[in-house]
Image (cartoon, grey):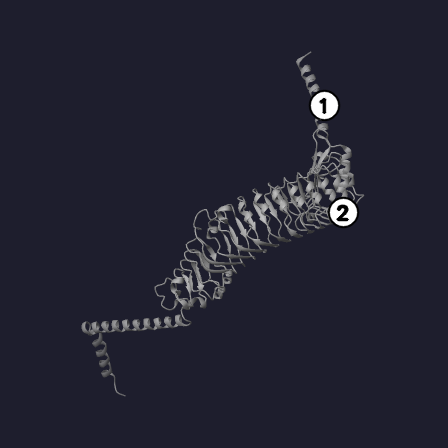
């Protein structure tokens, strides 16, 4: 056989083999089972696509836009490659359906194709969050016992949670937040023993929380805020030993905070604000040594500052405001809570001095202590340290006698709320970087005896009442834009411009103009006189010749 024939035979054989390989690869790429593709296509037909139906979505802490995932679904393509669909590589079954932020709009009926999704026997993850889906789930939710992840959040579902939810025993994550669900939580929820995350927040749930919730021993994340739950927080919550985040805020809970919460040694965040809780913070809280965030504001809690909190060395955010706490703030609060970044205890009845060392906490950014009965003198120092991060300080409506904020790097305008410190006798804001005007509210400081705002960048007129202070001049020096009556008297050595009386500037300008006119006239007269003398003395012919000519001319003229 010739070489050319051998080459041709080889090429033909290669082409046939290549077609076989291509056909095999094409078949291998089409993983989707036809029956499961049809189920998904029927599901697609039920809902409209409306761009306005989805909000911006938070995916792993990243805000992303929505897009209609089901638009990519078609008869002639492999469903395992459709947007939002994931298949198992070996079994070719659909195992995950993520249609979050997909602009879906429509109503769920008991006979819709959603029930057909139960024909996806390997489906483990169903995410329909951030759409505009509405209706009730009680008629179909029990058909998905094989799910491990279910997220229906940020839709418009309504009605009650059915008892049949208890059959979803494989669930590890359940989120129904931001809907319109109502009624009580069924006790069957306690059957979901594999749950690690449960979020029922922002609905209209009411009644008691079932004690069976305490059976969810693997739960790490529990969000029940912004509902209408009432009665007491069940003590069985203390059985959730793996819990790290517990939020009960914005409900109607009453009674005391259960001491069993102190057993949650892994808890990092606890929020019970905006309820009607009474009594004291339990001493068992001293064992919450992983706690970083504690929010119990807007309740009816009472007693002295909870000493148990001084053991929470990792605490960074503490909110006790709008309660009925009394007594003094412990002086060792700064040594115990050295990681504190935010403290809010306004609208209480705390008394006594405020520990000045509070301002030296290296991570502290915000202090809110308004409307208490704190008193005494307060030296605010050491903020010039590079480690200082304090940006917000609110101390209004207290009984402080003296505040010294001098020698720091405070900037911005002097807050108007400083006028609420009506019992203040001494205020020192000197040597900072304040700008803007002196607020007129400072005229309310009728008890003020000493004020120092020198060495700043303050401008504008000084409020009249502040000018009556005995050391008025030195109080305002080195502020290049300040003026007012307080600086018009005996303040010539102060580096601030006094305000000129109305009309004075025009009079001074007119007087200066008259003086210049007189000077100019005098100079002109002297120069004219000097030039005249020179001409008469040294150039007499310039004057005699013309006059002589005139005389002769007049003589030669005939008489008529």
Q: Which mark is residue 75?
A: none
User: In the current view of this chain or complex, which residue is farthest to the top?
Assistant: 1
> Residue 11: horizontal and vertical position, in percent?
68, 19
The residue at 72%/23% (across/down) is 20
Q: What residue sits right under mark 1 in the picture?
A: 20
> Residue 323: horizontal and vertical position, in percent?
59, 55
Q: What residue sits right under mark 2 in the picture?
A: 136
Of pointers 2 and 1, the one earlier in the residue sequence: 1
> Residue 516: horizontal and vertical position, in percent?
32, 71
Q: Nearer the viewer, residue 482 or 81?
A: 482
Above or below: residue 193 compared with residue 281: above
Q: Nearer the viewer, residue 488 or 37?
A: 488
Name the quarter where the N terminus is drawn: top right
**Of helix, strand and loop, which one carries label 1?**
helix
Crowding at dot 1, Cα within 10 Å, few <14 / some 14-19 / many 20+, comes out as: few
Left or right, 371 with reference to 111: left
- The answer to whether residue 64 is seen in the rendering is no
> Residue 244: horizontal and vertical position, in percent?
61, 42
2 vs 1, front mark? 2
The residue at 46%/53% (across/down) is 356
Left or right, 134 with reference to 431: right
Residue 239's quadrant in the figure? top right
User: In the current view of this chain or complex, which residue is farthest to the left?
Assistant: 537
Above or below: residue 117 compared with residue 325: above
Residue 192's quadrant in the figure? top right
Left or right, 364 with reference to 242: left
Q: Nearer the viewer, residue 481 or 203?
A: 203
Above or below: residue 304 compared with residue 243: below
**Of helix, strand and loop, which one carries label 2?**
loop
User: In the current view of this chain or complex, which residue is farthest to the bottom?
Assistant: 560
Left or right, 290 with reference to 474: right
């Amino acid at each position: 056989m010739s070489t050319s024939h051998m080459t041709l035979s080889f090429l033909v054989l290669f082409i046939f083999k290549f077609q076989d390989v291509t056909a095999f690869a094409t078949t291998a790429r089409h993983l989707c089972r036809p029956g499961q593709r049809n189920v998904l296509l029927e599901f697609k037909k039920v809902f409209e696509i409306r761009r306005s139906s989805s909000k911006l979505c938070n995916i792993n802490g990243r805000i992303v836009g929505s897009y209609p995932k089901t638009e990519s679904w078609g008869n002639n393509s492999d469903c395992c490659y459709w947007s939002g669909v994931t298949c198992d590589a070996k079994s070719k079954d659909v195992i995950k359906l993520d249609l979050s932020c997909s602009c879906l709009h429509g109503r769920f009926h008991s006979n819709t194709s959603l029930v057909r999704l139960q024909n996806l026997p390997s489906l483990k993850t169903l995410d329909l969050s951030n759409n505009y889906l509405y209706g009730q789930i009680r008629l179909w939710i029990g058909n998905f016992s094989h799910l491990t992840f279910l997220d229906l959040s940020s839709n418009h579902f309504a009605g009650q949670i059915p008892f049949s939810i208890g059959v979803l025993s494989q669930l590890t994550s359940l989120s129904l937040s931001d809907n319109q669900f109502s009624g009580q939580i069924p006790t069957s929820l306690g059957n979901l023993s594999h749950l690690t995350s449960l979020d029922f927040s922002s609905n209209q749930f009411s009644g008691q929380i079932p004690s069976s919730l305490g059976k969810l021993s693997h739960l790490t994340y529990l969000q029940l805020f912004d509902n209408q739950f009432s009665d007491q927080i069940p003590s069985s919550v203390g059985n959730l030993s793996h819990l790290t985040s517990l939020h009960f805020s914005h409900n109607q809970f009453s009674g005391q905070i259960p001491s069993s919460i102190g057993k949650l040694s892994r808890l990092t965040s606890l929020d019970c604000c905006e309820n009607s809780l009474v009594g004291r913070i339990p001493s068992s809280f001293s064992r919450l040594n992983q706690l970083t965030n504690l929010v119990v504001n807007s309740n009816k809690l009472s007693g002295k500052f909870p000493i148990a909190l001084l053991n929470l060395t990792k605490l960074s955010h503490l909110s006790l405001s709008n309660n009925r706490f009394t007594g003094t703030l412990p002086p060792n609060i700064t040594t115990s809570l050295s990681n504190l970044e935010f403290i809010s205890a306004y609208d209480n009845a705390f008394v006594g001095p405020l520990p000045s060392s509070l301002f030296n906490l290296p991570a502290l950014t915000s202090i809110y202590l308004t409307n208490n009965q704190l008193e005494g003198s307060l030296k605010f120092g050491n903020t010039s340290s590079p480690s200082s991060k304090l940006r917000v300080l609110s101390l209004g409506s207290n009984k402080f006698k003296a505040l010294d904020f001098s020698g720091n790097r405070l900037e911005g305008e002097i807050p108007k709320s400083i006028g609420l410190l009506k019992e203040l006798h001494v205020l020192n804001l000197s040597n900072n970087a304040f700008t803007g005007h002196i607020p007129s509210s400072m005229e309310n400081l009728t008890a003020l005896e000493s004020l120092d705002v020198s060495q700043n960048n303050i401008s504008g007129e000084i409020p009249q009442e502040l000018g009556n202070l005995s050391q008025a001049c030195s109080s305002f020096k080195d502020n290049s834009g300040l003026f007012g009556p307080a600086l018009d008297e005996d303040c010539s050595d102060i580096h601030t411009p006094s305000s000129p009386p109305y009309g004075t500037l025009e009079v001074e300008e007119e007087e200066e103009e008259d003086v210049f006119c007189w000077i100019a006239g005098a100079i002109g007269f002297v120069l004219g006189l000097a030039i005249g003398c020179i001409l008469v003395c040294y150039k007499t012919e310039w004057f005699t010749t013309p006059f002589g000519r005139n005389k002769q001319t007049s003589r030669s003229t005939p008489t008529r």
